[in-house]
Amino acid sequence: MDLLRVLVTDDELGMRLGVTRTLRGFTVQVPDVEDEIGFVVEEADSGEAALEKIRRGPPHILFLDHKMPGISGLDVLEATQDLQSEMLTIMITAYASIETAVQATKRGAYDFLAKPFTPDELRNTIRKAATRLALARQARKLAEEKRQVRFQFIRVLGHELKAPLNAVEGYLRMLQEGRLGDRLPAYAEPVERSLLRIEGMRKLVADLLDVTHIESGQRRRQLETTDLTAVARTVLETFAPEAAGRGIEIALHAAEPVRLTADRGEIEMILNNLISNAIKYNGDGGRVDVRLTRADERVTIAVSDTGIGLTPEESARLFGEFVRIRNDKTQNILGSGLGLSIVKKLACLYGGDATVTSQPGAGSTFTVVLAESPNPPPAPPRTP
Amino acid sequence: MNTVLQKRQVLLVDDDSDFLWQQKVQLEAEGFEVVTAVGEADAKQKLAERHPDLAVIDVMMDNPDTGFTLCYYIRKVAPEIPLILVTSIVSETGLDFALASDNDRAWIRADALLAKPIRFEQLRREIDRLLPRDTLATAASAAH
């Protein structure tokens, strides 16, 4: 339970005791906030005593009587105005005086409670204040978490961009220092590998732009009736040379047409990533099967390969950002580690999901479900 | 047994195949025998199969700290193998580890730490320092 400190400032003992008694054991549950909120009550019998306590450590909620023998409630408000804290002040006023209310509000009072008040009125007032405090805290916490996620993302990105730079620099130095002798053909492999790493880096930058576009929500989506079979056929054509070069057979199994209200660019991104992976992680002479089906307002894209497959642990991590499965079978395969996180984000935009089933050594099937929705959400989901 | 021409064997562990290729080619040109491994499990397997004279290990592989844990492992199973850690962590995070203080040496179980990108000469220098040419020759002649 989250405990909020309450300071009751009133020169009347009866009033202080009343508040203390009413709040004893009272708890508040705020929607969307996990912890229940309870209260610890302290008392001050004058404005001076209250200021002293506030200086030592401001409470979360301050009940402040307006009219007291020494310095008044308004003076206390004035003195605590510059306080850098989340403290909310509730003025206790004997008369419903508009003038006092205006003055108090100017000096930062959060709410008013008119004397005499019932326990229920007190509880309602404090519930309102506690809810506001809890939501403000929640918002700060979320902002901090988001900052951490971005920080982590940029750090990993830095690593992923530097690795290819280091590799290319290493090859260039070998060339510069003539490490492989004086004959140019000896450097064919370093040049080939350098070009590959540069291509990988270019892909990373492209994927990164895709991620930022999706996350910013600023890319204008053009949702229109799209034939996924036609899109798939175009995407497959672009991969045909690469697949043929490695003896991989690709087959499309789909009705003509398979329609969905969708952004064509997004569908291309999904298919590009899935099919590119299915080829990259396949064995020479393997198979890739692309299946498109529509049922109950949902389109399912399933891409199966006969590649290296994944362990259950690997499958569980796979859709995160910059996750690449590293082992001796994947060490020469280039990837940004962003492709599947992009697929997952896009699937979420369509109220769907991306999943994988796999058998190590036998192959994997990636399944993306996209829902038909007349009013798709404009804002993208948060990064998981 | 003829051990005079026995080559010094280096185990290279890194998940970047280009780094492995570059160092391997250059070390072989200098007369070393090179064994490569792409991660922790692979490195442990290679260690079980043969006994390298020295290991060069990248820090961030399967996990961000794989290199450190692998060093601990090697220190336990083969404490006599000198270890060189290679990492780009220093330049990326601003975390400043060096093997300069006793505190660092207490938790980083390596004999040398090199920041990526490394120049081959740096690596060569550290290998020469940790694996003087005459130690093996002495060991070889002692075996006669």
Image (tube, coloured by chain):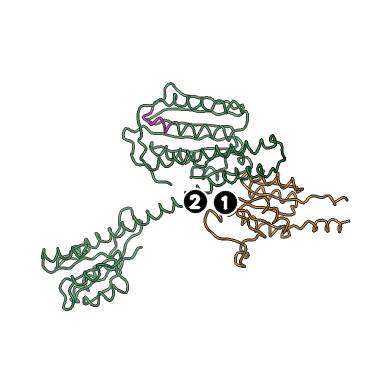
Chain colours: A green, B orange
Residue A32 placement (x, y as % from top left): 33, 53
Q: Nearer the viewer, residue A366 or A341?
A: A341
Q: Is residue B17 visible?
A: no
Q: Nearer the viewer, residue B62 or A299?
A: B62
Q: Badge 2, how many Cα within 10 Å: few under 14, some, many 20+?
A: few
As shown in the figure, which amino acid type bears the numbered disc 1?
A: Asn
Q: Is residue A259 magenta?
A: no
Relative horizontal placement of residue A209, taking residue A310 as reference (left or right): left
Q: Badge 1, how many Cα within 10 Å: few under 14, some, many 20+?
A: few
Which residue position is annotated with label 1?
Answer: B63
Tell me the distance, in whole angstroms, between the alpha carbons under discs 1 and 2: 15 Å
Residue A17 placement (x, y as % from top left): 22, 74
Label pair 1/2, CB-CB below 8 angstroms: no
Residue drawn where x is 51% and y is 49% of the image: A156
- Provide the chain ID for the residue under circle 2: A
Local secondary structure at mark 1:
loop
Q: Nearer the viewer, mark 1 or mark 2?
A: 2
Local secondary structure at mark 2:
helix
Magenta residues, as a range? A260-267
Which residue position is annotated with label 2?
Answer: A155
Q: Is residue A262 magenta?
A: yes
Q: Is residue B130 visible?
A: yes
Q: How many marks?
A: 2
Residue drawn where x is 41% and y is 53% of the image: A147
Residue B108 placement (x, y as % from top left): 62, 61
Residue drawn where x is 47% and y is 24% of the image: A254
